[in-house]
Amino acid sequence: MELRMFLEICGMNNIECAEDAARKMLEFAEFLIAENKKYNLTSVTEQEALMLRHLVDSMTVLPYIKSGARVLDIGAGAGFPSVPVAIMRPDVQIVPLDATLKKVRFIEEAARMLGLDNASPVCGRAETLAHEEAYRAHFDAVTARAVSRMRILCELGGAFLRRGGVLIAMKGEASQTRDEIAEAEETAKRMGLADAVTHEMTLTSPTETLSRVIVTMEKAADTPPQYPRAYNKIIK
């Protein structure tokens, strides 16, 4: 993949990316494309689109992750935003979590290939792991990219956060996101999460423009021990 093009797109979106980190990003993207037929990881394979929609989009969470943070990425899928975060922020320890073993194995292989000793993928379900001592109230940030509605994310992610930690939900269309936030208000309070803050942005490349919203919610109080519930109860 073309390094100059990627750095240009980063610059268009006011994202600073050193060349060594950019090279790792593109190595990851090339590995994703090579492995895509085996794992069915993404429908976005065109070079410029992948750079913007996956790599640059993942990098937009970086300002909301504090130095030295321990981060859980729920529904990590093909490693977005977890792998770009691990590349850009070696100070951060990130746990990509996915319920599909083949996706976790893909991230493990990508992390080994890129030398990312700060990424530790885990296969499991969030609503189960959140009740384990090793994970509950253990993280400074929880990320989720295009995973589920805010109401569901609040219940799945809230228990993983320690007080003062932040839930970072990566969303698309702004009006739908506002509806989701309103729908999630009661659940968020029950999980110990403070009011949502929205950060709207436009991502751009030479050929396309995307609207994105990041929703952040700080953990203000402990999550009651019965939460999260079984997934079939959460989605009702």
Image: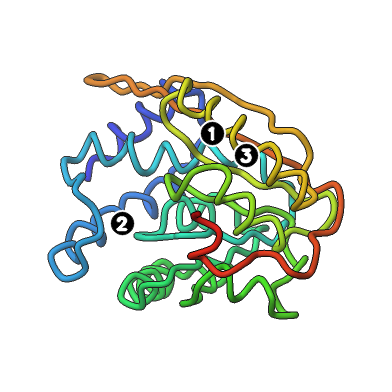
Residue type, label 3: Ala
Q: Closer to the camera, 44 or 130?
A: 130
Residue carrying label 1: 180
Residue carrying label 3: 184
The residue at 68%/36% (across/down) is 185
Q: Residue 128: x and y, percent?
A: 58, 75
Q: Is residue 28 above or below residue 12?
A: below
Q: Is residue 108 above or below residue 87?
A: below
The residue at 47%/35% (across/down) is 171
Residue type, label 2: Glu
Crowdedness near tag 1: few (<14), some (14–19) or many (≥20) residues, C-alpha within 10 Å: some
Residue type, label 1: Glu
Hey, which quadrant is residue 6 in on the image?
Answer: top left
Hey, which quadrant is residue 157 in on the image?
Answer: bottom right
Q: Residue 88: x and y, percent?
A: 54, 49
Mark 1: secondary structure = helix
The residue mark sitting in front, 2 or 3, is 3
Residue carrying label 2: 27
Mark 3: secondary structure = helix
